[in-house]
Amino acid sequence: MDRRTVILKKLLTRLMGFIAAMLLLSIIVFYIARLAPGDPLQSFYGDAVESMTTQELQEARKRLGLDAPNHIQYIRWITNAFHGEFGLSLKYKIPVMEVVSPLIGNTLILGGISYLVVFIFAILLAISCALFEDTLFDRIICKVGTAAYYIPAFWLGVVLVLIFSINLNWLPSSGAYDFGKSGDLLNRLEHLVLPLIVMVLSHLWYYAYMFRNKLLDEFRKDYIILAKTKGLKKVEIIVKHCLRNIAPTIISIMAISSPHILSGTYIAEAVFNYPGIGALSVESAKYHDYNLLMLLVLITGVLVIISSIIAQSINEMIDPMLKEQEAATWKKATKNSSSW
Amino acid sequence: MIMEPILQLKNLSISFDTANGEVEAVRDVNLSLQKGEILAIVGESGCGKTVLGQSVLKLLPKNSRIKEGQIIVDGEDITNYKEKKMRNLRGPALSMVFQDPMTTLNPTIPIGKQITESILKHNKVSREEAKKIAIEMLHLVGIDDPVYRISLQPHFFSGGMRQRCVLAIALASNPKILFADEPTTSLDVTVQAKILDLLLDIRDKTGISIVFISHDLGVVARIADRVAVMYAGKVVEIGTAEEVFYDPCHPYTWGLLSALPSNTTEGENLRSIQGMPPVMMDPPPGDAFAVRNEYALKIDYEEMPPMFQISPTHFTATWLLDERAPKVEVPLSLKRSISI
């Protein structure tokens, strides 16, 4: 088997796995949403639903397609979904795509920037702690980091608003931008600062400490002593040898952490009233806005699964051992190894 | 004329501070190494031979300290050298080869890069030149097709080849003294012999001085010019290889030699030295070997024996050589094999 077919086959397996996972996810969420007690008509008609007759309710259900058995409803939904139709939002009464599209960018900006900042700082902190292992510096950073990590995000958010928005009046307390200034980059950045601080502080140490310990584990290995006999500095050994060797671990952790950080944005969005899909998904579940909920779940699912696929691909490039094993597996031309 | 030795240890004592107290790993060791000489240090596990080797490169853990004595490398007293100065010595002056080649190489970095790393660190050469030197080094240690293999990761190599690579790394920065810490212990016998021949060959070609640390007298007999026998952190007998192997004077050396399988006749059980080495937390006041020594005298339990000179190069620390001591013959079994 030449290399191209191997890659093609691998891609195909991953794609199939991806589709299967998405189908499974959509089925589970679809059923669970419908199992939850409550009436979606409540959110569609609001309080008017109280004064509607049974017959009117029946007709309304029929119009919205909520009268059919669940599996029929699912089949209808999935067929439409494949055509790019995700239906109407029951709460906003416009297509769900239109509800989500202006907000998703906000969440991606907040999530993406926090993600990068968290990991860049986590790696830098881990390296400096490993360098000064067991010195006062390392101990202080460890204690402060742990304390910061356990401050609840919602409380921290409120305190930050109190200090920086109300008392000092330096930064805005809510929203993603001031009214009519959606294109103003500086204005957007100003609004990002506080949510970002909350996001970073509530995630940073968890990863920094993990990486620090991984680095130190690596630093205890036998090959380090050989590196020392070459006359390398500790920082060179940690960066060139240890960090390189734990890179696959870091990347895997980064990949599986994307839902962790994404879910973090939900809290930050709620506290700072930041218009993003986090707040929206809480709302959609609350109001039984089935179509909106399904779309949001699918978007989150796609993000999570794609990031894990990316992680694995990068890992294979970095870690030759992984690649080797895989090559051996392919050579056997057996049924495909599990892809993720 | 006696040349200035390249390495001198004067009254060297090294201790480890542990939670249970001070462990005296090396006690009052005097050794010197001439240029181009191979000095073997032999002894049981835990006798301090590895600590002795690593102390010269200052690779010991933080809880160790040089309690007394001096380390002089090429006329330079390095006893109080700090990490920064040591880094400049590791490589150009001192280098080391370790026991387990499977773990001493960094598994993810190509061999070539691991060699050039130390060349680039200590010499002002370009990457291409460093690579050329690395290829030469691999050629020197007997790796076929080094131009191709330079870009391979360690897992492509067998144990013997990896040990050759470690040797190439150790030799790359052209050290004056090579510490070989049981370099053949984890290799099988045929590979062992080849690595030993290689070391001899390299010594002849480059004039490097080697401290060969081993517990295997068979291996030592093949390679060493001089042999130092260590017991409980002390050198108990030192002399040229001929002297130690054919005219051993210390009961411990007798024990070691008669424990060799080749010194046992057919049908006889393999001999061993009764008992265990002492715990170095609280070493006995007299000869540490006394409790295991069938020739022990009363004074052995009370007072440390001084070094008795047998020939200009042969010294032994045992009270048996004192003029007041009773005459003790070399054990019969050993005599038989020595006289062959």
Image (cartoon, grey):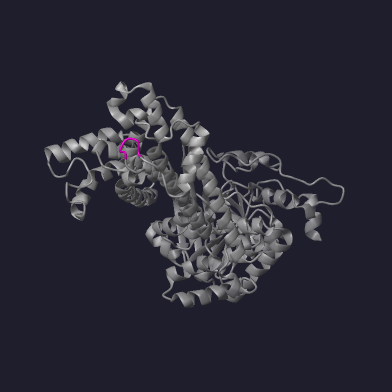
Please name the predominant secondary structure of the magenta segment in the image.
Answer: loop
When asked about the image quadrant of residue A273, the answer is top left
From the viewer's perspective, tell me whether residue A49 is left or right of residue B25.
left
Residue A91 magenta-highlighted = yes
Of residues B249 and A20, the one nearer the viewer is A20
The answer to whether B312 is drawn above or below residue A51 in the figure is: below
Q: What is the x, y in percent for residue B113?
A: 50, 67
Q: What is the x, y in percent for residue B139?
A: 61, 74
Quadrant of the frame with the N terminus of chain A: bottom right
Q: What is the x, y in percent for residue B215?
A: 65, 53
From the viewer's perspective, tell me whether residue A224 is left or right of residue B302.
left
Residue A285 magenta-highlighted = no
Of residues B260 and B296, the one nearer the viewer is B260
Residue B145 in sight from this viewpoint: yes
Furthest toward the left, the residue is A168
Q: What segment is highlighted magenta in the picture?
A: A89-93
Of residues A68 and B92, the one nearer the viewer is A68
Residue B175 in sight from this viewpoint: no
